[in-house]
Amino acid sequence: MQTAARPEKDCRARSKHPLNRLPMYQKIHSVVESDFLAVDRFIIDQLHSEVPLVESIGHYIVEAGGKRMRPVLVLLAARSGDLRREQHIAMAAVIEFIHTATLLHDDVVDMSTLRRGRPTVNAQWNNPSSVLVGDFIYSRAFQILVQIGDMRIMEIIADTTNKIAEGEVLQLITKNNPDSSEQNYMQVIRSKTAILFQAAAQCGAILGAASAENEDSLRRFGMHLGIAFQLIDDVLDYVGDADAMGKNIGDDLAEGKPTLPLIHAMHNCPPDQAEKIKLSLSADSLGPDTLQEVISIVQNSGGLDYTRELAEQEAAQATQCLTPLPESQFRDAMQAMVDFAINRNS
């Protein structure tokens, strides 16, 4: 794959934005603070159930926090247009519910025990509870969509959740597969992660009565942002801070996931090291010494720099997609999301 020059000029230009004088995370949320609080209240209301276990797990997940990048993107996209309806609050909750449900199911499939610094639901309760409450949250998202009552949005979300499911299955197929390719990897992250960013941006644009051009620009923005976000996630799995990330370093490797840094390392390190990676990837479990050895190989192979380079390319394309939008604090905040996606440490 060809690599483009790092977008250094774009980064210098972005530093002139007023929002860039604030801490990165704060500047993203500050322009939609009241909407963000309203989304939190809406989510709590919608978690109500006559089954106590559903509410207990639902509140446990919400209290764990998280970056909430996807619902914030709905709010910013909607506000960047001509928003005349308050349905963007409900739409942001739909996106967060879908994301939450996928995490519940992911943790069961991956047998994960730690997320956002706390035990996963499947570890705190059990696998059946995690799967079934995930189903409840999924279905509640579609109940909210019916209340919003926009057929285009319903079609987008239906197609998106179907694509996410395909991405999950594709990732399952590639698990423990030392022959997995970069092409397969990119297909997984587009379907499993970036597609929900795309839906968030496009649905926000629709509720904000964006022009056809701006809706398409925001749709593409969401895809590029989501890819960049996942690429950096996969870098951080090898170099991140466990306390900041709220999960163990090397989790993806331990779970047998061939992410891009690992794939690149297999093709660019000495044969004996490549063989070590392949054996580790196909193993049922890894000891701490082997895990650390493979992490070191990946860190020294150029795979992390290569993955960051691709993330910066996606970030540059995301920035370009914002050009047609009118200047506003909401557009600046979406640009700040791009900066945050590629410069974060968790």
Image: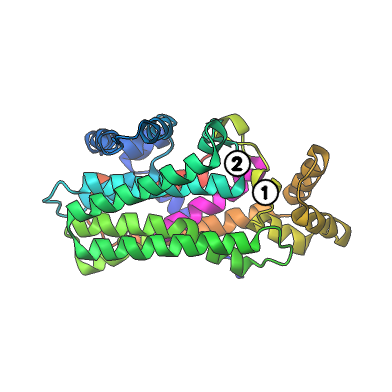
The three-letter code of the residue at mark 2 reads Ser
Q: Residues within 10 Å of mark 1 (few under 14, many from 20)?
A: many
Residue 186 covered by magenta stretch? no
**Residue in front for this viewpoint, 143 or 198:** 143
Give the magenta range. 222-239
Residue at which label 2 appears: 112
Q: Where is residue 70 drawn, in percent x and y?
A: 37, 48
Q: Are marks 1 and 2 in contact (CB under 8 Å)?
A: yes
Quick one: SS at disc 2?
loop
Q: Residue at x 40, y 56 (%)?
A: 196
**Residue in front for this viewpoint, 32 or 330:** 32
Q: Residue furthest front?
A: 51
The three-letter code of the residue at mark 1 reads Glu
Q: Where is residue 139 drawn, in percent x and y?
A: 33, 51
The earlier-in-sequence mark between 1 and 2 is 2
Q: Where is residue 135 drawn, in percent x and y?
A: 40, 49
Locate the N terminus and report the quarter of the image it occupies: bottom right
**Residue in front for this viewpoint, 91 or 145:** 145
Residue at which label 1 appears: 255
| Majority SS type along the magenta span | helix
Left or right: residue 275 versus residue 200 is: right
Left or right: residue 325 versus residue 308 is: left
Q: Where is residue 209 drawn, in percent x and y?
A: 16, 59
Quick one: SS at disc 1?
loop
Colour convention = rainbow
Rendered position, 210 above or below 59: below
Residue 230 covered by magenta stretch? yes
Q: In the rendered image, which quarter is residue 81 located in?
A: bottom left
